Image (cartoon, rainbow, N blue to C red):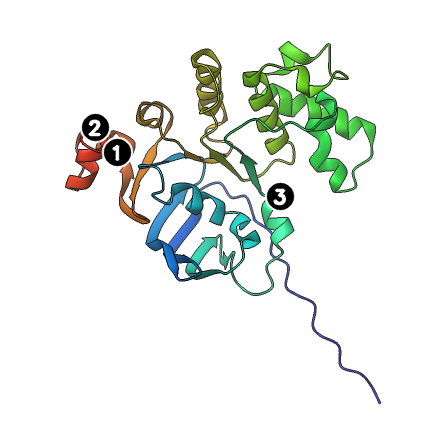
Amino acid sequence: MTTATAPEPTVYHLRRSAEGSALDIRDFNLWYGKSQALHDINMEIQKGSVTALIGPSGCGKSTLLRCLNRMNDLIDDLRIDGQIQVGDFDIYGPGVDVIALRKRMGMVFQKPNPFAMSIYDNVVYPLRVDGVTKRSVLDETCERALRSAALWDEVKDRLKESALGMSGGQQQRLCIARGIASDPEVLLMDEPCSALDPIATLKIEELIHQLRGHYTIVIVTHNMQQAARVSDNTGFMYLGRLIEYGDTNTIFTNPKKKQTEDYVSGRFG
């Protein structure tokens, strides 16, 4: 007598391509228990673009961002409906390898969160988690990521020092370097400048401009001026709904919806 074994789950990996959409969100809804937090979200995010999500506090923009790499899976009593397509598959479909998905979606949080280890070890941490031990590969990745994060020249002579001794702005750029060390397709940024001073904020914004094209960037920001400066496209969210989404210049100068016009003109929010 033979025992039937369960089939292996299908493992999906993101595939980098030269053009088209990086993410396609279709009729997406989310509930925390009985409370609905996102309503019928539809938006297509183009590869290599910078997309800003704006709106008043509690409007659902960070919730939506965390859906893109399924970080909300960790919340009890959460339910979703609809699809988020990456390439030709739904990231919430059955059998998706969530760990593999998160490796392709770099994440930078509101406050810098370097690990209590050296600058070098912070950057190469994602590779070591994957079992990479070859020193030449780790060294090359560390330098590439720090250069991409415009940090190499500032720290190349103190890679063995603790990352906790860096300034706040440097720590945030280090977290960006760590986020791109595994060369993800998408970089998610949740209000990455809210804890930084104006000079450090300017450096992060310059960095976003430098990373545009190679990475698809989705940034949540409460700063409308920042959204106007750094993004190609902007989505305005209110009460869990995507009110308007389009070219950033159009959203800020000639929006189609009155709610959008009222928000970007400072009438509420």
Given the image, on which type of amino acid does mark 2 rest?
Answer: Gly
Q: Where's residue 165, x and y in %?
A: 67, 15
Q: Which mark is residue 103?
A: 3
Q: Residue furthest front?
A: 34
Label 3 residue SS? helix
Bin the neighbour count of mark 3 within 10 Å (Cα to Cα): few under 14, some 14-19, many 20 and up: many
| Position of 22 relative to 261 (above/below) | below
| Position of 58 relative to 113 (above/below) | below
Q: Which residue is mark 2?
A: 266
Name which of mark 2 and mark 3 comes first in the sequence.
3
Marks 2 and 3 sit apart, C-alpha to C-alpha, by 38 Å
| Position of 127 relative to 227 (above/below) | below
Marks 2/1 in contact by CB < 8 Å: the verdict is yes
Marks 2/3 in contact by CB < 8 Å: the verdict is no
Residue 169 lies in quadrant: top right
Label 1 residue SS? loop
Q: Name the residue located 45 percent from the left edge and 54 percent from the top edge.
A: 84
Q: Which residue is mark 1?
A: 269
Bin the neighbour count of mark 1 within 10 Å (Cα to Cα): few under 14, some 14-19, many 20 and up: few
